[in-house]
Amino acid sequence: MASTGNGLDYDKEQELKAFDDTKAGVKGLVDSGIQSVPKFFVAPSEETCNEKSDLRHAHFNVPIIDLRDIDKDGVRCEIVKEIGIASSKWGFFQVVNHDIPQDIADEVIESIRRFNEQPNHVKEKFYSRDKTKKVRFNSNFDLYKARFANWRDTLSCLMAPNPPPPEEYPEACRYAFLHLLNNIQRRAGQDLFKLLSEALGLNSNHLTNMGCADGHVFYCHYYPACPERNLTLGHTKHRDPDFLTILLQNQIGGLQVLHDNHWVNIPPVEGALVVNVGELLQVISNDKFKAAEHRVLANCAGPRLSVACFFTTHFEPSEKLFSPIEELLSDDSPTLYRGTSVKDYIDFFGSAGLPDDSSLARLRL
């Protein structure tokens, strides 16, 4: 039991359980007509402040890379160079003229709206905190560990390898997900890993042959409009615990990346995909590429909708270890990390809650 400062007792655990037991998530709170943010969502002021985003640094822009004519030699060399710089300096970039058709991207985003805005008795069938479930819906995976809850609900779906039968995905987004997966597996993901391999000076198939592109998990976020957006966050600052993330989003902003100790907005660009380096790619690249901290601000407009396509195999029981790539090591660039399996890395990340800086630190030699 904790004091609220006004003489009343506040039982955070009880409040969290009451919220969780509704199985309605943040959208359920909004639908109930609340006009203020519940106390367990309130973040420390240093977490929500934008003092690192002042106008003196408005010239910072996340790179936008055009993949048009990617197979032309001269163009490809320039694209590889741009991706290498973006991955080492920013850890984030956007790509345009990729191979995911806009109508498929739009349908995926709309399907997330459909799922979240259907009656709660339909959604609650998927509500779970069982990390082994291949399809699950909840609000805040670390609800009971985090210092404060985030203003979002999430549908998580394992897409590959060994996905569940298609009928286990929610009907509202089943076919949209399968179409997106086909496009990511067939071209978009493969292209990006080839370009990243080449940017590291490796054979174009190196990262793919290592298994970096073998697994896909979709994390589908629904960020309702927030009545007191300055008191909480849509997503706490964090780095992604995967190899690579491809993000689709609607036109409501809020995503920011920490660059040169300043929060930089990543405004939605029509037709663009946001791509970011995961912590596991930072490990195997031996810090040649950097996973950047990022966050999502709460917004008075909404809902913000996004689908983060994680390249990860953490549902697989494999003990395969990933460590810095031998070809990237030298006397001047000694190995910086010990090896880890994907599952062990994710298990540690999940047990720590957000924000957490120890996942990478515990592997550093």
Image (tube, rainbow, N blue to C red):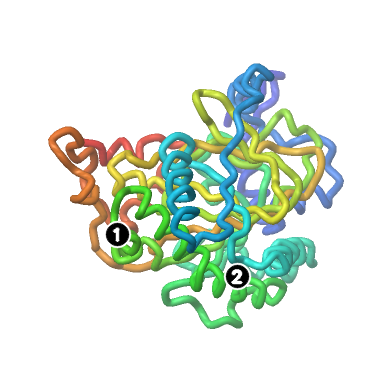
Count the marks: 2
Instruction: Determine whether 59 is above or below 22 in the image.
Output: above
Query: Quadrant where the N terminus lies?
Result: top right
Which structural element holds mark 2?
helix
Residue 92, placed above or below residue 20: above
Question: Which residue ends up furthest to the front in the rendered image?
Answer: 74
Classed neighbour count for the residue bearing mark 2: other residues with Cα under 10 Å, few (<14), some (14–19), many (≥20)? some
Residue at x-position 35% and y-position 55%: 197
Amino acid at circle 1: Asn
Q: Which of 321 and 315 is in front in this view?
A: 321
Find residue 54 and report its horizontal and vertical position in percent: 66, 19
Looking at the image, which is closer to me, 45 or 110?
Answer: 110
Whether residue 156 sits left or right of residue 302 in the image: it is left
- Label 1, on which residue? 203
Residue 323 is situated, as x and y percent measured from the top left of the image, at 24, 50
Say the numbered circle drawn on residue 180: 2
Q: Nearer the viewer, residue 255 or 271?
A: 271
Could you tell me which secondary element the residue under label 1 belongs to?
loop
Q: Which of 292 and 48 is in front in this view?
A: 292
Instruction: Residue at 65% x, 53% y: name it.
Output: 272
Residue 120 visible from this viewpoint: no
Whole-number angstrom distance, CA of label 2 to CA of label 1: 27 Å
* Residue for point 73% across, 49% down: 304
